[in-house]
Image (tube, rainbow, N blue to C red):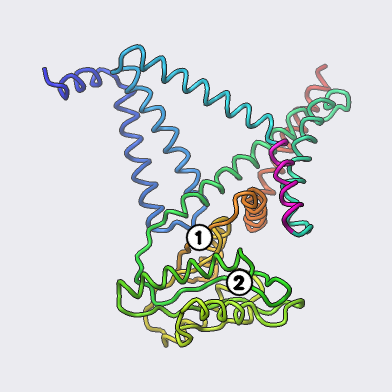
Amino acid sequence: MSIVDHLVDKLNINPAFVFTSVILVIISTLFLYLWIKEPRRLITGNIFALVVLIWGFWLSILIFKLTPPVIRYLWSVAFVVGILLILLLSSFAWLFLLWNAYFIWKYESHTLPNMLTLLMGFALIGLWLYQKFTHWLHLPPYLAPTIATYLIIVMLSFIINVFLYQFYPKKYCENYLIVLGAGLINGTKVSTLLANRINASINYAKKVKKKTGNWPKIIMSGGQGPDEELSEAAAMAEYAIKAGIPREIIILENQSTTTLENMTFSKKIIEKDTKTKPYTCKFFSNNYHIFRAAILAKKANLSANGVGAPTRLYYLPNALLREFAAIFVLNKKRHIIVISLLTLISVISLVIQLIFH
């Protein structure tokens, strides 16, 4: 009997494997279709998480059905170790957040958006205290943990989307590249964070030039803040020109003050420049910001996906929390409804317990 025949003989008698295989193919195909067609959907992260879970279950069936005992033992150990690591990381997440907050405080400005890991660390400590004193204070015992679990699930979905978006295919044939602005140092100088965005667009533009023979037009998008001596767009253009980009392919969009305005005003410039002819477009920001920027591009009816520029590792946790908070606010009605229902259920549960005890 051949190896293939042996596998078929082994697996055909396992309904769980057949059923899981069918579900896996369906869900994986659905994910790939939705992601490739339109990656700017929050639900994509949930579907991908489901795909990973089904893949794990499917692989477990294969391993326990086909492999020798030593492989099954190692797989079981790896599973248990993985669960323990997740529990360990969850238990000490507050410590990591406070440790990260120290570096943010040391190397970045002391603004509220840069204190999110600090606040989150204290919030996790507060959740632990809530659980300790909930019985004494007659508080709904499951309210805070339930809401926290809901927020963690939503946050993980967002982080998965941010991760996936980094790998969205790049064609290197776009007509327009939009670089999203950021604050200037001392009101005049491009920061490292902003320079990374510009450098990413320059590298991309060079690849477009090599592939198509033509330079794409680069829109530097960013207005002038109250503490800035010139617009972000002007400072970005100067940086790009010094880096060797032809001045004639650079367009300034110097009125925007938000990411949504970056997208909206840049779209108007492109439509005016093309005179309603078809065009293709990419935008550039930092990797942590690129998914939310994509959602706002969709909101502005701009048919464009983004390319993320690198960010210093210590800055990522706080930046991702800030981006999550912004996405949360964008969908606040949905989250308020869910949290209100969870609160109502917890309060009703507490009342029933007090009545019958």
Amino acid type, mark 2: Gly
Residue at 73% x, 50% y: name it. Answer: 116
Instruction: List the residue tagged with mark 2.
Output: 181
Q: Which residue is mark 1?
A: 308
Please identify the quadrant where the N terminus is shown. Answer: top left
Per the rendered image, the range of residues in magenta is 94-108
Out of 78 and 129, give the one closest to the viewer. Answer: 78
Residue at 71% in and 34% down: 345
Q: Is residue 107 magenta?
A: yes
Cβ–Cβ under 8 Å for marks 1 and 2: no
Who comes first in sequence, dot 1 or dot 2? 2
- Which secondary structure type mostly characterizes the magenta part of the structure? helix
Quadrant containing the C terminus in the rendered view: top right
* Relative horizontal placement of residue 276, taking residue 181 as reference (left or right): left
**What crowding class fits label 1: few (fewer than 14 Cα within 10 Å), some (14-19), or many (20 or more)?**
many
Outermost residue toward the left?
A: 1
Residue 228 falls within the magenta-colored stretch: no
Kind of residue at disc 1: Gly
| Res. 333 visible in picture | no
User: What is the spatial separation of the Cα atoms under label 1 and label 2, in whole angstroms?
Assistant: 13 Å
Instruction: Identify the residue shown where x is 78% and y is 56%.
Output: 112
Q: Residue 13 is drawn in which quadrant? A: top left
- Residue 334 higher or lower than 205, as above or below: above
